[in-house]
Image (spheres, coloured by chain):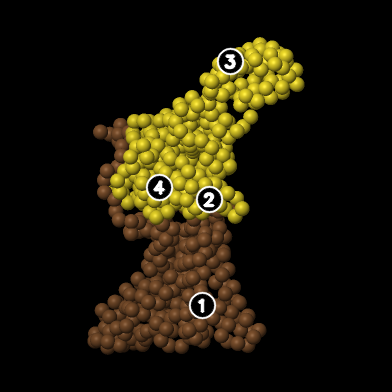
Chain colours: A yellow, B brown
Amino acid sequence: MGEPAAAEGVIQVEGVSIIYGRNRALDNVTASFPAGAVGLLGPNGAGKSSLLKTLLGFLTPTSGRARVLGIDVAGRPLDVRQRVGYMPEIDCHIPGMNAVSLTAYLGELCGMPSIEAIQRAHEALYYVGLGDERYRNVETYSTGMKQRIKLAQALVHGPRILFLDEPTNGLDPKGRMEMLALIRDLARRKGVNVILSSHLLRDVEETCESVVMLSHGKLVGQGTIQALKGASGELFEVRLKASQQQHDMFAAALAARGCSAAPAQDGMLDVSLVDGLGSEMVFSAAQSVGAQVRHLVRKQPTLEDVFARAVGEK
Amino acid sequence: MPIYDQSYRPYSGTLSSHSMRWLTIAKAGLSHYLSRKLFLVFLFVGFIPAIARGVIIWLTHQAAATSQISTIDGAWFRNFLDWQGQFLLLVCIWPGAVLIARDLKTNAIQLYLSKPLTRLDYVAGKFAVLAGIAALLMPAPALLLFLMETGLSTDTTFITSFFWLPFAILGYSLVVIIGAGLLALAASSFTRSGRYAGLLFFAIVFFSQAGGQLMRFITGDHSWIVLSLPALMDQTGAIFFGGPTEFGVHPLPALGMYSLVVGLSLLVLRRRVRAVEIVT
């Protein structure tokens, strides 16, 4: 099986729907995941984990199909899982094993000879920062260490793609930074394609070049973070001297031009303007409702702004 | 380069074929239990009947006074396997009923199935752990006793009369281990607690026996005894070794009941052993 061309993406999802009873976990999702680090974004219940489980062949789509590295997931799930490392969201381990024996055992289950699996287990454990603790029973590990062992077992067989499901869950700030640094290193220096599923936009922004955004099981946006930020028009932080009624009228005046004003912290408004409109639009809208602009600063759009815009949040 | 300086690198070594991956699960499971002292004590206790019977065989080949202690024939071996069947039931309760429940408790099934393994590989590996232990307690000592009797015999009367015994031992053991083993794994997949799974397995065996007897008593129809799993074992012994059945179960209903037990166990395992729990 030849490798897919870079432009084609390492994962293609075509019209995939997953329906549990009356619940539509994924609704006709079509997306392409390019090589490198890609964030799979969405609030809890958006369908991120369902999509990852579909890509692993755990869930059979009600309709549509998915290909990983050009391999049809439904037809050859074992070939897909041979090339993919999966770090589950939930706490999981095999009881009675230390980190070395667990990681080596899971390497053997991927078909590695016993001695090489042990060697790789040591390497993977040192890489994720568990070198000194590798002979401890996994059941005695802290939450942070359990996250690391999950990453080590996902890496042991040298996967081409890593599926990381909420890898920073339960980590303290230092642990989170270290985990994100590992993910960045894997994607940028070790040549591993990473699909990072997270509801934490900062995590995705710090590690990924591209995102696929889901909301309520539907695709709401995809592309490089750079392009998505650029496409979101201009964003301003505004403070008005105005009554509540004038605030509402100001928002309505902006909405009439396809723009939006969302309340932010400290009485500020986040004003998002469509392409082609500049700051004069803010003054003009304020003047039209008899309000005064007391503060106006151009804001660098964050991934949060991009995501909020994609899901239509005010 | 020392391991701690290796960093991460892609794997470019060889990979074994997929068809034998279940064996990795079996090997890991067996070595886990065989390294536990309590389990070794249990195994030793399980060997005591075999040791006792070995002594009997030895005595029957000594002086004429001791040669009449016991008649070594098919019924003698069937009786030995029936006795060892008690240990099989214990093995099904521990570790049998723990094998999958423990993985459910720690969400390990998701780890297993995220590797290039099918659910069948997983179940086959777990079954092989149980079957391997059961084989140490049932067919292995029985075959050793057969070899001992053959070796100590001064003529060929025994081997010519009972050449079929190894096949009967293996066939009977296989049928009983498959039935009891799959039932134990199915019970194990029902709960996250190994203890409850063991209790569930014990309850199924106990109530099948009690239910069969009760229905026979109420209806006056002897054929209800087919519900009893111990009666099924007895009939299996009669099929492989000949001789009477204690419970008087007919072979065809027994085969039907056995198929039902195996079929239901596989169905339960198919539904319960999944990488994801689907709640609709």
- Quarter assignment of residue B128: bottom left
x and y, in percent, of residue A236 in the image: 58, 18
Measure the C-alpha gap from mark 3 to mark 1.
Answer: 81 Å
Question: What's under tag 3, amino acid-wise?
Answer: Ser
Under tag 2, what secondary structure?
strand
- Residue at left offset 64%, top offset 85%: B219
> Would you name the residue on which mark 1 appears?
B257
> Would you name the residue on which mark 2 appears?
A18
Measure the C-alpha gap from mark 3 to mark 2.
Answer: 44 Å
> Would you name the residue on which mark 3 appears?
A279
Between residue B156 and residue B258, name the one nearer to us: B258
Measure the C-alpha gap from mark 4 to mark 2.
Answer: 16 Å
- Residue at left offset 56%, top offset 82%: B225
Above or below — where is B242 with respect to B107? below
Mark 4 chain: A
**Quarter placement of the C terminus of chain B:** bottom right
x and y, in percent, of residue B10 in the image: 31, 39
Mark 1 chain: B
Mark 3 chain: A
> Would you name the residue on which mark 4 appears?
A67
